[in-house]
Amino acid sequence: MPTKANKSHHHGNLKTVLVDAGLQLLAEGGLAALTLRKCAARAGVSHAAPAHHFDGLKGLRTAIATAGFKAFAKAMIEQRDSAADSPHARLAAIGRGYLSFSENNEALATLMFMTKETFTDDPDYQLAGEAAYQVLADACTPFKSGAAGAKGTEVLVWSLVQGYASLARSGQIDPHETPYAEILPLLALQLR
Amino acid sequence: MPTKANKSHHHGNLKTVLVDAGLQLLAEGGLAALTLRKCAARAGVSHAAPAHHFDGLKGLRTAIATAGFKAFAKAMIEQRDSAADSPHARLAAIGRGYLSFSENNEALATLMFMTKETFTDDPDYQLAGEAAYQVLADACTPFKSGAAGAKGTEVLVWSLVQGYASLARSGQIDPHETPYAEILPLLALQLR
DNA sequence: TGTACATCAGTGAACGCGCGTTCACTGATGTAC
DNA sequence: TGTACATCAGTGAACGCGCGTTCACTGATGTAC
């Protein structure tokens, strides 16, 4: 049986294809390269087609950021699950996943945290974002203490890794000179 | 004596005025609002005039980022100099300056760290950026230890405050729920 | 199984918009003598 | 002090570009009977 709908203008899968095209465009040309027309072209479809699937450019960006958060959580989970079975090792692994995702998806990572460029009230977007956050928060649970507030530990770790990632992404710090693996222990000593 | 050159088309001060206009535009409309034409309009000058002062849009952005770094350093220094005379108090004050600048200049702070949008090899830009960094690094000096590498402490503190700032800026964390003043001590305990 | 019909997902032409950039120009400023 | 001239910093018209969006349309799909 031949692939169906391959010459029809009924695509059947266009939404996904457009999001994938957008991910490619971000990777190749940065934030400015993400436009409805380019996504449509990349998907092999007329430039007006995306309007049937997304609420304008902002809607497309929201869907792409959502896909980004899913990949982000996946990257952290993969690292965590292949790490030694200790809270410290797991927290370090989450950081590795966070940073490698950030390195490999510069523009996407930027977009994901530019909340003005997306519909932040989109349910899928929120769900994906919260799921990613939860991965990190869970890894922080063993380190909670009275000294930190309820969310203090998570915010500390999250800020640290997010800041490290964004400074590395923009070239302000050199991950070779001061690798994250040497920075995190300065925290972990105290969280122990 | 009347202000000279106020009806002449020789402005005399246009470069500065254009940069100020750009700072306003960023504050009002975010990154996307910063265009050569809008800066020129805001400065009351024809839209072709900026070409005489900047190497295109990227050059304008570089000059604006440079001005941003100067204001940034100033914000940190002001806080530091009005703080109690202890290393801890000073480091905390630097953080306050960093965060308040970041809060009050969302788009500008973003631009300053988007190194692909500026000519990062511009001497003025580099100088201003390094001067700002030095303010933070100096405040870290008293906390250097063997455990951290040569730059480990600075990178730790910088990452933390940068991450906290960018997460707060994008609404991912709530500075009221987990204020920076409660996060920093978790570090300081260990840096002591 | 067949027919009529509504719905849906595309097409492609057209629109207006703001953008950066170029260009010949003009008038003020500064300098040489 | 005056004159000639080069330089400089603007003007404003024009250009082409890619963008998001709209719109009438068309052909495939799915459904009711």
Image (tube, coloured by chain):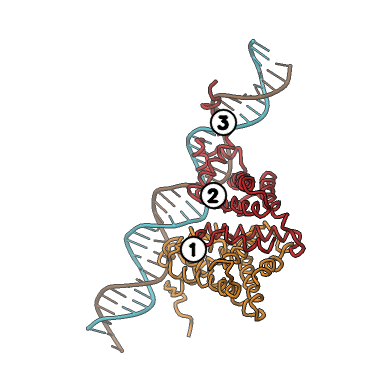
Chain colours: A orange, B red, C brown, D cyan
The residue that mark 2 highlights is: B105
Identify the element where label 2 is drawn. loop
Where does the image place residue B44, in percent across and percent down from the top left?
Answer: 50, 35
Residue type beneath disc 2: Asn
Q: Mark 2 or mark 1: which is in front? A: 2
The residue singled out by tag 1 in the image is A61
Q: Which residue is mark 3?
A: B11
Could you classify mark 2 by the number of other residues whose Cα lies within 10 Å: few (under 14), some (14-19), or many (20 or more)? many
Which quadrant does the C terminus of chain B fall into?
A: bottom right
**Distance of mark 2 from mark 3, alpha carbons?**
28 Å
Callout 1 environment at 10 Å: few (<14), some (14 to 19), or many (20+)?
many
Q: CA distance from mark 2 to mark 1?
A: 24 Å
Q: Residue at x 59, y 61 (%)?
A: B183
Q: Chain of mark 3?
A: B
Residue B41 place in picture, x, y as percent: 49, 39
Chain letter for mark 2: B
Return the disc, 2 or 3, that comes first in the chain's sequence: 3
Q: Are marks 2 and 1 on the same chain?
A: no
Both on one chain, marks 3 and 1? no
Q: Where does the N terminus of chain B fall, quadrant-wise?
A: top right
Residue drawn at the location 69% of the way across and 61% of the way down: B191
Amino acid type, callout 3: His
Q: Could you say which is closer to the camera, residue B126 or residue A46? A: B126
For the residue labelled by badge 1, is the local secondary structure a helix, a strand or a loop?
helix
Relative to D22, A94 lies left or right: right
Q: Residues within 10 Å of mark 3 (few under 14, many from 20)?
A: few
